[in-house]
Every structure is written in C-alpha cells, then in structure tokens.
Amino acid sequence: MTILQAFIEALESLNSNKLRSGLTILGIVIGVAAVIAMLAIGQGAQNSITGTISGIGTNLLFIFSGNDQAELRNVRPLTLQDAAAIADPFQAPAVDAVAPFIQGSNIEVASGGEQTRTSLGGVTPEYFGVRNYNVAEGELISEEHVLGRASVAIIGVDVAEKLFSRTEGLVGEIIRIEGQPFRVIGVLEKKGGSSFGSQDDIVLIPMTTARTRIIRRSADRVDIILVQAASAESVPQATEEISSILRSRHRTDIGADDFSVLSQQDFLQTVQTILGVFTIFLGGIAAISLLVGGIGIMNIMLVSVSERTREIGLRKALGARKRDILTQFLTESSLLSLIGGVIGIILGWLIAYVVGQVATATGNAFTPAVGLDGILLATITSTIIGLFFGIYPANRAASLEPVEALRYE
Amino acid sequence: MSEPVVLAQNLTKMYKMGDVEVHALRGLSLQINKGEVVAIVGPSGSGKSTLMNILGCLDHPTSGSYLLDGEEVSSLRDDQLANIRNRKVGFIFQSFNLLGRQTALSNVELPLRYAGTSAGRKEKAREALIAVGLESRINHKPTELSGGQQQRVAIARALVNNPAIIMADEPTGNLDSKVGQEIIDLLLNLNKERGTTLIIVTHDPRVADQAQRIIRVRDGVVEEQE
C-alpha cells in the first residue's frame, strides 16, 4: 500500500461517516482555533503596546514622585526647580532635554454647542521635542506663552473632530476649557490609536496657565518630568545623574529615594513580561481544548476499530501486513486532525480578525498578528496529536489476530 | 497431475482456554494435489475450522509441518504469513466480506494493492470480474448487488492474484439453493478452465458431493477420505 492509496482509502472511510468525522474534527477545530486566536490576540496586543511605548519618543526617561519599592513618609514632590537642575548640562551631561509636565484627566472642553471630556497637559516648549509631537497646522507653545500665562491651546485631532467635525482651519477658533476661553493656536499631527487610548485625544496648554487656572498645583509642583537622554547608550548614565541630583536636592542621600526613574526600556520589559505570561496562559488554556480534541479522536478511532474488526480480519486474510493496517488507521486519525487543524487555523484567524475589528470600532485599535510560526505550529501540533492519539487504536487494530477478527460479530 | 500443492504432516493445534487445554488438531496429515477439488466436512467441534485456518495460513499450527505450494509455512512470522496469504491463497467467505463503501472493482483490487502491484491493477481486477460474469456490475457497490453477485465479486477477489489454492468457507451458506448451485458451478468451471485448486469447507452434503474428494474430519484427525 502506498501512502497515496492509504490517503484515498482514509478519505473514503471518513466520508462514509460524515457526521461522526465532522464532530470529531470539530474538537480539533475548536482547539486549534482557540490556540491561534489567543496567540494572535496576545501577539497583537504586545505589538500594539510596544509600538505605543516606542512611539512616545526616543531615549526617554520618566521621573515620578514616590517609590513603590520602599515605604516612605515624607515624599517631596517633584518641582520645576528639580527639572531645571536636571537640565543643567554640567550636572547631567547625558541629559539632552527636560520637559516637566502636569496633567489633568476628564477635563471638559467645549466649543459652540459641542463639548467633550479629554485629558489636558500643562507643558513647556521642550515637551514637543521630547514627545515627538508636531503640529499639522499653526504653531507650538512657545516660551512667551509660558511666561505670559497665555490662554492658548493646541488640540489633538480627536478633540478637533469632536468639537468642530474637521481637523483643518482651526487656528484662531476659541474653545472653552472648564468654562474659560482659550484660543486654538495649533492642531497636532495625527499619531494614531494605542492600547492606552488615543494619543490624539488630548489638549495641551502652557504649564503656567494650566497650574494657575485649570489644574491647580501648589507652586512649582509638577507631576512627571520627562527627560530625553543624549543617546540610547547614555540612558543608564542619565538615570544615574538624575538620581544623584534628585537625592541631593531631596536630601535622601541616606535611605530610600523618594522618586522613581523609569526608562522606556523598563516599561517595555514590564509590559512584554506581563503580556508574555498572559499569552502563554491563554495559549495554555487553548491547548487544553486541543488535548481534549485529541482524546476525542482517540475515542472515535477506538470505536471505529471495534466496528471494523471484521474488515480488519478480511484485509489481513487478503494479505495486509501489520504495517498496512497501522498505516491505514494512522492515516485516518492524522487526516482527521489535519483537516481540523486547517479549518481551525482559518477559524482562529477569523476570530482574531473579528476581535481586532471590534477593538478598532471601540477605539482601541490593534491588529491581531497571526504569524507563520503560529500556523506551522498549529498544523504540526494537530497532526502530531492525530498521530499520537491514533497510535493506540491503530496498534490495537493491527495486532488483531486474523482468525479472531474474521469471527467477530 | 499428482503434484501436491498442500502437504500437511502431523499437524497439531492446541488452544488454552483458561486452564483447560483444547486439542483442536491431533496429528492430522493431509495431501491435496494441484487442480483438485476437495470438500472438507465434519461436525462442529471437529477441528474443521482450525484446519481451514491453518491451511489458509491465517493461523500457525502448534507443531507439524505444512508445505504450501512447496514452501514450508508452519513456522513463518505473521508478516511473512500475510505475504503468503496474499500470493498463494484466495478466500471466499460465507458472508462475502466485501467492503461496503467501495465498488466491486476496488474490492477486487484490494489483494493487488497489498501485493504492491500498481501496473495494470485495474485491468487485472476487471478481467477477474469478467471471468465471474460481472462485466456489467464493475462499478456497483456491494449494497447494489444481489447475494449471488456479491459472492461472485468475492470469487473474483480470490482469483485475482492467481493463487495456488482457493479456500471457500461455506460459500453457499448465505444463498438459496438455486443461486448456491450457480456459485458452485462457477467455482467448478474456474477449476476446470484455470486448474485452480479448490478447497471447500461445507456442511451441505449436496455441495460436498460435487467435489472430487471428500475429507471428513473428526476429533482433530482425518477420519476418512473418499
């Protein structure tokens, strides 16, 4: 018997019992689809979040007040003076730019009859360089705006869409932020969505204006200081320099730091670790259903062997060797799981695609990534499962004594 | 014409059923010549079926020697026996034992597939079906055939590898007497035309009487030959 003949006979045999074959295949389909979909969604989420973090800027360091590694009593807030000290090229040569930042969330912004709630940032001119922000039209916030506490705002395209239903020709329009009038001086370039919410759903105003009129922070206090290191290599050095400056300024030379310095790499690693575990976890659960599908194959093959005992006896009487019978049944079980695997890949891809579409529709754009490796893995795994769970039934069939098998009723 | 195709000497077969030893064959000796038509008869429990299984190479004797077509087969391994069955033995069963989901043609092809024949397989199968008078039913499935036609397909399947012997186990058992006689006529005809050695195991004296020789088996030995 050649493999091709075995293949054709297996197809005939599976075809003669369509409902049963279909249900058996279904077990594998669900398992493979679940694995593919979970891996694709996990990978897609990872790509999306990684992309978002990378898109924030390059060689960035984030300085937060407080330290979750230690219990602290007197946490000194970060201040503009801290930022100025870090910006000193003699104290911190590895630091390229410093952008202190205060933020408010759920701030009401209105224009004409339209209103929306968005996040608001109080920024200095450095912020745009550090964050890679550019205006599609108009101008950036300048030093004069900051010094003069000007009532000017730069809006993201999402905010522009909501308030004006357009993203062009908006310079000079007046918007109300928490009831106070601001003049639009620029519209940000579209950055695209992210898993954290859209980066375009934002309003930026001068820091001094924000502090005195919208967000209200006690004098000189800032929420986050963004620091751009001179190069990727100088990120660790910059971290050291910032830490030593802040330690001496906050008088925490002895004891735990009351601030944290995190690099983009730290964020990336944390996120990737979490999502990696998450993906493996989901994939693992999906793999269990694949296992159950495999047991289904074994079950149905055992039934099939005992139903076809006479047939096996006859085949042996006509000269089938042990190997021929083994091949016949293994081909059937592998074929079951291979077909299931192929359908499962398509279904899994569809599920991932639909999830991606739903996510996009709800504003958290991300693209599920079905990799070639995932497809190969699923195909090979499902075929191996078919082989593995087929071995026992096939071996049972092949070991039947022809005399016994022919007598079987 | 007296060249032996089956030469069995001192065959014994012992089964263990729990603690009880059952001696199905007790030193049976037998010779069947090429081209002969032989009927094996005997009451149930006589060892008739065991003898048929051993002569058909489906089972090993416990001791003794068995030369089939000049080859010693009593001590062959399972796969070698499968090979012998494939090349030298054609089986015809009481209940036809055709594969229901395959056509008459591919049923007949089956032994050729296990033999590894690929060239001219379909033609050989077709010729065998023509030889049993089924040229118009080649692509029918067994469910579309009458009992007599199904048994003809089985005969074609037994013939197709040109075996040294054809073992027929109650070939007419599931057929009415008229169709049964047609089948026996066909087998005798094939014997005459092709010189195929025919061994028929039967209960039916009307079938046995048409053989050239009747071998009566009782208590695991040949009781008499006539």
Image: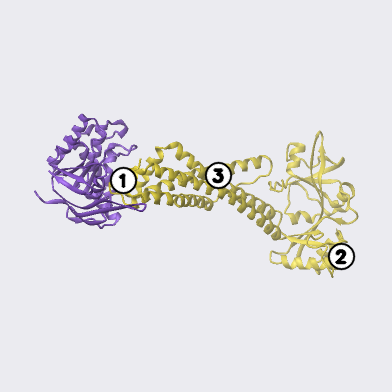
> Would residue A164 appear left or right of B55 to someone viewing this image?
right
Question: Are dots 2 and 1 in contact, CB under 8 Å?
Answer: no
Of labels 2 and 3, earlier in sequence is: 2
Residue B134 pos. (x, y %): 22, 34
**Dot 1 lies on which element?**
helix
Q: Are marks 2 and 1 on the same chain?
A: yes
**Relative vertical location of residue A154 with respect to residue A54 in this rendering, above or below:** above
Residue in the foreground of this view, choosing between B12 and A231:
B12
At label 3, the amino acid type is Gly
Point out the frontmost of discs 2 and 3.
Answer: 3
Residue A376 appears in the picture as rendered:
yes
Q: How is the image coloured?
A: by chain
Instruction: Please tell me which of labels 1 and 3 falls first in the chain.
Output: 1
According to the colouring, which chain is purple?
B
Dot 1 surroundings within 10 Å: few (below 14), some, or many (20 or more)? Answer: many
Residue B213 vs residue B148, the one in the foreground: B213
Q: Which residue is mark 1?
A: A315
Q: Which mark is residue A348?
A: 3
Residue B112 lies, with reference to residue B102, above or below; the image says below
Which amino acid is tagged 2?
His
- Residue that label 2 marks: A250
Please report, as a chain letter, where disc 1 is located: A
Can you give x and y, in whole percent of width and height, for residue B138 in the image? Answer: 26, 35
Chain of the residue displaying label 3: A
CA gap, disc 2 and disc 3: 54 Å
